[in-house]
Image: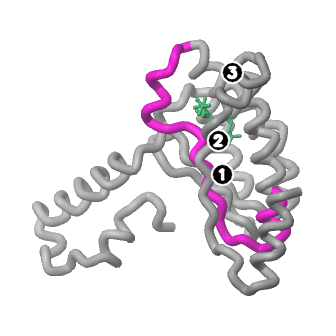
Amino acid sequence: SKCEKLLAEAREAGNLPRHIAIIMDGNGRWAKERGMPRIAGHNQGVKSVKEIVEVCGEIGVEALTLYAFSQENWKRPTWEVSALMKLLMRTIHNEIDNLNSKNVRVKTIGHIELLPPETLKQVQSAIDITKNNTGLVLNLALSYSSRIEIMDAVKKIAKNISQKSISIEKIDEEFFSKSLDTWD
Ligand code: FPP
């Protein structure tokens, strides 16, 4: 595939990215161009992503972040949100053994507690089953917003300061990075 070829070339050249992030958009447009319903586009999105996960794992990329569902996406019509949640749940259910056997570790960023309970359960079980794996980190951004991630970090730091457990001088880039969700 195209993805495989690109990454193999990058590895040859010694500049394989350590972390790749994918914004899963264009699903609706893909379907529209073919006169198909939006959900057919989302199904196709899952197909592409499966292939990318596999190639990244084989070639030795350390982490792959999939921007699968943003905070903004909650504003979509109820039927579409619900179809996406079911698709996410079904995909994890279908793929978990395969991911686990390929040593993939599933992680998330975002406010996953806002997901419907059955979807959340599936996501948490994937995290749990794969937590000791040492291969590709598959990071799913779910109910994610970068502004909220930053805001959460600011709140955490502000709380520490107000409780006098840290001083303002301690805040540098490294300290801030460690306050973000993306920090282990
Ligand atoms: C954006 O395309 C895509 C989404 C909002 C959802 C993507 C998520 C899934 C397919 C769920 C499954 C995810 C995983 C990780 C298994 P769009 O509808 O905005 O299309 P457009 O850009 O053409 O409008």
Inspect the image, locate mark 3, and give the three-letter code of the amino acid beneath it: Arg
Give the CA separation, mark 3 to mark 2: 23 Å
Does mark 3's beta carbon lie closer than 8 Å to ligand 1?
yes
Residue nearer the viewer, 53 or 119: 53
Q: Position of residue 3 (x, y in %)?
A: 80, 59
- Is 68 on the left-hand or right-hand side of 102? left
Q: Please name the residue shown 43% across and 32% down the image.
A: 72
Q: Are marks 1 and 2 in contact (CB under 8 Å)?
A: yes
Give the CA separation, mark 3 to mark 1: 28 Å
Q: Are marks 3 and 2 in contact (CB under 8 Å)?
A: no
Find numbered disc 2 in the image and state the secondary structure of the residue it sits on.
helix
Q: Position of residue 36 (x, y in %)?
A: 77, 18
Mark 3 or 1, closer to the camera: 3
Q: Which mark is residue 38?
A: 3
Q: Position of residue 109 (x, y in %)?
A: 51, 51
Find numbered disc 1 in the image and state the secondary structure of the residue it sits on.
helix
- Is 122 on the left-hand or right-hand side of 165? right
| Most distant residue in the bottom direction | 14
- Can you tell which quarter of the image residue 103 is in? bottom right
Residue denoted by label 2: 123
Find numbered disc 3 in the image and state the secondary structure of the residue it sits on.
helix
Inspect the image, locate mark 2, and give the three-letter code of the amino acid beneath it: Val
Upstream in sequence: badge 3 or badge 2: 3
Residues drawn in magenta: 54-78
Q: Which mark is residue 127?
A: 1
Task: Using the image, determine if residue 54 lies above or below residue 9.
Answer: above
Mark 3 or 2, closer to the camera: 3
